[in-house]
Image (cartoon, rainbow, N blue to C red):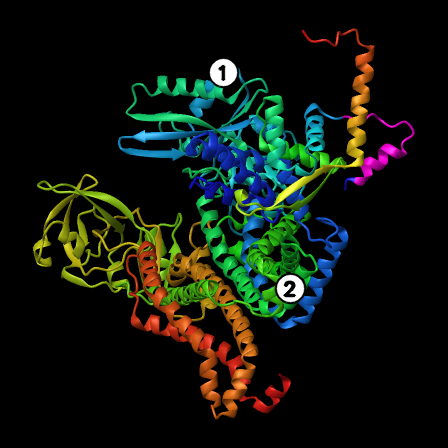
Amino acid sequence: MSHHRPPKLPRRIFEGLAGKANIDDLIGDLDELFYLHLQTMSPRKAKALYWKQVLSLSLSYAVRKRKRDARYGGYSASSFSIDMMRNYLKVALRNLYQYKYFSILNAFGLAIGMSVSLLLISIYSYVGTYDNFHQHKKNIYTVISHQQDGVEELDYATAPQALAEKIKTEYSGAQEVLRITKGYDNQVVTDKENIPVKAYYVEPEFFSVFSFEMVQGIASALAEPNNIILTQSTAMKLFNSHDVIGNIITFEGGVTMQVAGLMKDHPMNSHLNFEMLISHSSIPHSQILTEDRWTNYPKQYVYILLRETTSSERLQQYLNKVALQTYAQSPVKVTFALQPLKEIATGGDLLQAIGIKWEMSGFLMFAVFAALILLPACFNYTNISIARALRRAKEIGLRKTMGGAKSQIFLQFITETVIITLLSLLGSLLIFVLIRSEFQRMMVAGSSLDLSINWQMLTMFTAFAVVTGLIAGIFPALHFARLTPIQALKSKLNTRGASFSFRKILTVFQFALSFGFILALVVFGRQYQYSMNFNFGFEKKNTLDVELQDVDPSLFKNAYAGLTSVQSLSMSSGLLGVNTSRTWVYTTEEDSIEAAQLFVDSNYIRNFGLTLLAGNNFPDDGTQRERYIIVNEEFLKAYKISQPREALGRIFTIDGQDLEVIGVLKNFHYEPLMYPIGKFFFRMKKGEFIYANLRVASHDTYRLFTQLEDVWKQLPTQKKFVARYFEDELNEAYQTYQVLLKIVAFLGLLAITISLLGMLGMVVYTTENKTKEVSVRKVLGASAANISLLLSKDYLKMMGWAMLFAIPLTAFLLDLLLTEIQYYRVQLSVWDILLSSFILLTLGVVTITSQTYKTATRNPAEMLRME
Amino acid sequence: MAIPSVALIHNTIKPMKIYLGEFEELVLLTIAALGKEAYGVSIQKDIEERCNRTISIGALHSTITRLEEKGFLKSWVGGATKERGGRSKRFYEITNAGNRAVAETKSLRDELWSLSKLKLAIK
């Protein structure tokens, strides 16, 4: 007999593939054949043949049939039946009912976990419907452009109108070529106020390309200049009536136009977002460019409706040809691309989008957060279910002994989980409805979303809940399916071991996440406070900024200076800390520098309490031509002037004029805190003033405003009085923080609740299981505190680990984020970390002790009797 | 599982002729010929030697399984030997239904032979 043996690997593979099917005789055949072969051929060849035979048998009908027969035990009727399904359902419901406490805990956690995902799903699905109402949606394209100017490369959603004209005359494959120009800042003048409106300048073809519905009038009116088509809601807004044809609309600047048509409001899911359409021939002169039409085309859009017979590739080739020809001589290179209608709202990031744009990067961020909330909730379910396996072991053992197959046990537990997630969906829907509107308000394009619940959405939600059930239930189901009946019946389950440390890691991760949210909340809150109370280096209290509009500054001054409620008054071209303009400064010797500037009058520096380090204020008389500037410290640094005194008298060339430095100011924050203080100077020039800055005394805002308004009415102007407190303006500029705080607080609340629920479940379970141990210990003299500690120790340790991991990571991420948001910012301090740790620990300890204390203080005799 | 197809043959008024594939017939007859010693390897070897052709073990077992499903074969487990690493053999035996099936096939052939103009003699 040869010493060669049949190769083991193919046999193992074969056994693995066969699963429970009995293939002992087949392997016997294989081995016997192998030894037979050895007598006539080399061992290597015999082994190769063995492999081949294994392959042939594995794929054979014989093995397939045996596997099919072996799948179900002797008592199982068939693979799947309605009766069995009904039984799973019944068992699942009974179990959920029997362990009410855990069911509620689980359902609650999952409901919270799914809520954010529901928000994401609803938004994503709504965004998917964008622009699907256009009849010709398949053949509508917009032209987007890629501009290369030196090293700068930019992608625009715009395209030159000259291109549209060229396509119209040269290219026959386009059924319609449509030019749209977006209005800059259209304001309708009414007797009460100026109302800003979103307007597009369009051609009559607008209505043959897009499927918007006219109610009154005809689209061709847009061929004539100064004609307007209003949407119904704009008509209501401006005239409070739908009968508006023939009405005259006056725009700021004095242009009047006539309403020639009324259309239905465009659906909310339209990337074109407008309140009125104005005939393209009435674009104001200021917005028409005669030079550089091919390289400078702001707010100009080109839409093309292709003929059914033309392919977009052909048009693209034509566009490439046009671009090559047009920009052959130009220093600026532009290429054009076609973007199909359905990609406009969701496509890549482009500059100057015509209307609403949904960025995928935003969705991705959102998805990450949704997952960070959902997965811990799923994990809680998994964790608690597996931990409680002991309770279900007898049931599983019996089922298996009676012929229950793995797949059947699996199905039973998955059914149970899916029922729980479907129940949770109800709670989740409630949360969804509660947070929906708040969330929409926080989003930039939130008003263009319709998140009302419809059947389609409900179907998706249900599908999502089922998938969540599968995710949460797959591990417990597999775990239970794998139990051997003997172990299960003897209640000798191995619930510790490898899976236990995995569970520990996940629990630690959950707490780390919660800690991260708490810390972020603490730090952002402090940053907000810090920004609000920041010392900008100038007086910001009680500053009221009035828009001068067309009122002459000196007239304004005369009228308001006498009021008792106005303590002092100055003029400026912009608001400090909110906006400034920039210009270039030249000297004869050195390179030019870019610096921020603000035009002010001689009262300004005094009015805002700015500190002069050297030199003087502007002279009071501002009638003569511009002569002086007052600079800040940074400005001096740029020219390497160390002493403020030395700067006085220096001449700089600004906008073609030689201006002399007559004063140096201490640095102050002329820009928002996002940016560092840079080179800055004040100029004094009449005719540049846009605001009057009033330092007011009265705290009775209402009386103050009526008084100021009365004075305004006597001035020679038709405009309305517009004034705002500087502090309000500032608050608005820092609204990002409020939004950020709200989001972090909300997500944090969810994350913390979920991790605490998870811990609660585990603690309840452990204390229940350790009743006997606790009683014995008590009888032997352990104190309540001892026992509480014994029961809580593990969890406290896990929280400790979580904080240990979370502190450096969160600190690092927050540091990055804070720097990204704002230049002047708070530093993360030990106190932030201590406070956050304290909050998390308190929450955790309260949760744990609520359970352990109850067990620890109970009468041991009672507990032992129960056992 | 195997019973219905046999029952069908008996119950239908005009039973359809049983169809046996060439290889099926070969396997059935070989098993009948081997008597009590018919199991995987012996069947394969016998066919290979007699017909001078190689057959794959997978194809053989598939055919055996199908024949068993049709009720033409029955099997039992036994006889572990040392050459097989102590693994059992599955022995096969032809059933009455199997017998009938081969017989019917044979009579069909005989009928055709008698009708055909072919010379039975082989050169």
Residue A298 drawn at (x, y percent): 40, 33
Q: Quadrant of residue A509?
A: bottom left
* Residue A116: numbered disc: none
Residue A447 drawn at (x, y percent): 55, 49
- Depth order, front residue of A662/A265: A265
Q: As shown in the figure, which amino acid type bears the numbered disc 1? A: Tyr
Q: Give the residue pinned by disc 1.
A: A171
Dot 1 falls on a residue whose secondary structure is: loop
- Residue A12 makes an appearance in the image: yes
Q: Give the residue pinned by disc 2.
A: A397
Locate the N terminus of chain B and report the quarter of the image it occupies.
top right
Q: Image height check: is A40 above or below A542?
A: above
Q: Is residue A253 left or right of residue A291?
A: right
Give the chain of mark 2.
Answer: A
Chain part drawn in magenta: B3-19
| Mark with earlier residue (2, 1) | 1
Q: Is residue A366 left or right of residue B56?
A: left
- Depth order, front residue of A135/A515: A515
**Comparing marks 2 and 1, which lies closer to the viewer?**
2
Give the chain of mark 1.
Answer: A
Q: Image height check: is A667 above or below A858?
A: above
Residue A530 drawn at (x, y percent): 33, 66
Marks 2/1: CA–CA distance: 77 Å
